[in-house]
Amino acid sequence: MRTTPDRKPKRENTGGVSSGVNQDNLPVIPTSSEPHRTVKEIAESWNLSQDAVRRIFERESGVFVLDNSASPGKRRYRTLRIPKSVEERVHRHFLNAQSVHK
């Protein structure tokens, strides 16, 4: 009689999105199912210019950047969609930085 080796239980396929908790011990929500905000919405709620918000978020991990890859001589258009969890993480970072500098 042939025995099969012990197998690890199959993991749920999350489509490459990690689950569990983040570094702040908060639950990680897959970014596809959480609300996303525009640069304009965040600029209005944070009382900043859209350019400032774009600079803050354009290199943040988890932000969706849609780039039209314009031809030479044409203006480049980029659309950012910022998941709520990324917005909250960056906001906490700025709040912590302010409290350290006081």
Image (spheres, helix red, strand yellow):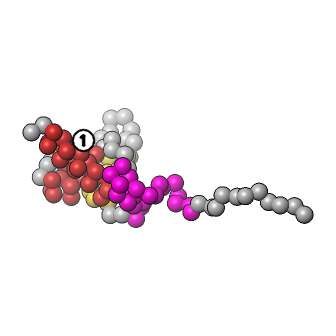
Residue situated furthest top in the rendering = 72
At x 39% / y 38%, what residue is drawn? Answer: 71
Decide which of 1, 75 is in the foreground and name it.
1
As for residue 52 lying within the magenta part, the answer is no
Q: Amino acid at mark 1?
A: Arg
Is residue 25 within the magenta segment? yes
Residue 50 lies, in percent from the top left, at 19, 48
Residue 79, position as x, y percentages in the image: 32, 51
Q: x and y percent of residue 53 in the render?
A: 21, 47
Residue projecting furthest to the left: 102
The prevailing secondary structure element of the residues shown in magenta is: loop
Please state, as top left, top right, bottom left or bottom right, where the C terminus lies in the image: top left
Give the extent of the magenta segment: 12-33
**Residue at image mark 1:** 55
Image point (15%, 57%), residue name: 45
Q: Is residue 5 left or right of residue 56?
A: right
Give the x, y percent position of residue 58.
Answer: 31, 43
**Pointer 1 local density, CA inside 10 Å: few below 14, some 14–19, many at least 20:** few
Quadrant of the drawing holding the N terminus: bottom right
47 or 67, which lies in front? 47
In the drawing, does residue 38 fall left or right of residue 47? right
